[in-house]
Amino acid sequence: MTTTLGFLLLAMPGGSEWILILLVVVLLFGGKKIPELMRGLGKGIREFNDAKDGVKREIEEGLNEKPKEVK
């Protein structure tokens, strides 16, 4: 149990690691490409959430349907 907790603590980046990650992203993509990258990421997240909500709605509608009587 403590091994798993220790691994999670080591796997999560802290404050200085986030700064280093952001610096590397700026160096790789440049300041002009970052807004495009974030817009694309936002669109992807929005589409994923819309699809997830659609599937959830379809499942709920399927559960609420009354079964058809067979004659």
Image: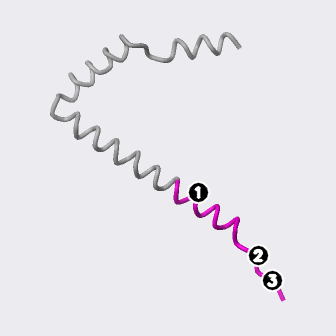
Residue 33 is covered by the magenta coloring: no
Quarter holding the C terminus is bottom right
Q: Residue furthest right?
A: 71
Q: Mark 2 touching mark 3, by CB under 8 A?
A: yes
Category of crowding for the residue at label 2, using alpha-carbon neighbours closer than 10 angstroms: few (below 14), some (14–19), many (at least 20):
few
Circle on res. 47: none
Q: Position of residue 24 (x, y in %)?
A: 27, 20
- Whether residue 24 is situated above or below residue 65 in the rendered picture: above
Q: Earlier in the sequence, mark 3 or mark 1?
A: 1
> Residue at left 23%, top 25%?
28
> Residue at left 64%, top 62%?
60
As measured in the structure, the alpha-carbon distance from the residue carrying label 3 to the one carrying label 1 is: 26 Å
Q: Residue furthest front?
A: 64
Q: In the figure, residue 6 lies in which quadrant?
A: top right
Category of crowding for the residue at label 1, using alpha-carbon neighbours closer than 10 angstroms: few (below 14), some (14–19), many (at least 20):
few
Residue that numbered label 2 is attached to: 67
Q: Residue furthest left?
A: 32
Q: Is residue 53 left or right of residue 28?
A: right
Amino acid under disc 3: Glu
* Dominant secondary structure (helix, strand or loop) of the stretch shown in magenta: helix
Which residues are the magenta region?
A: 53-71
Residue that numbered label 3 is attached to: 69
- Whether residue 65 is situated above or below residue 46 in the rendered picture: below
Amino acid under disc 2: Pro
Quarter holding the N terminus is top right
- Whether residue 17 is situated above or below residue 58 in the rendered picture: above
Circle on res. 56: 1
> Residue at left 76%, top 75%?
67
Amino acid under disc 1: Lys
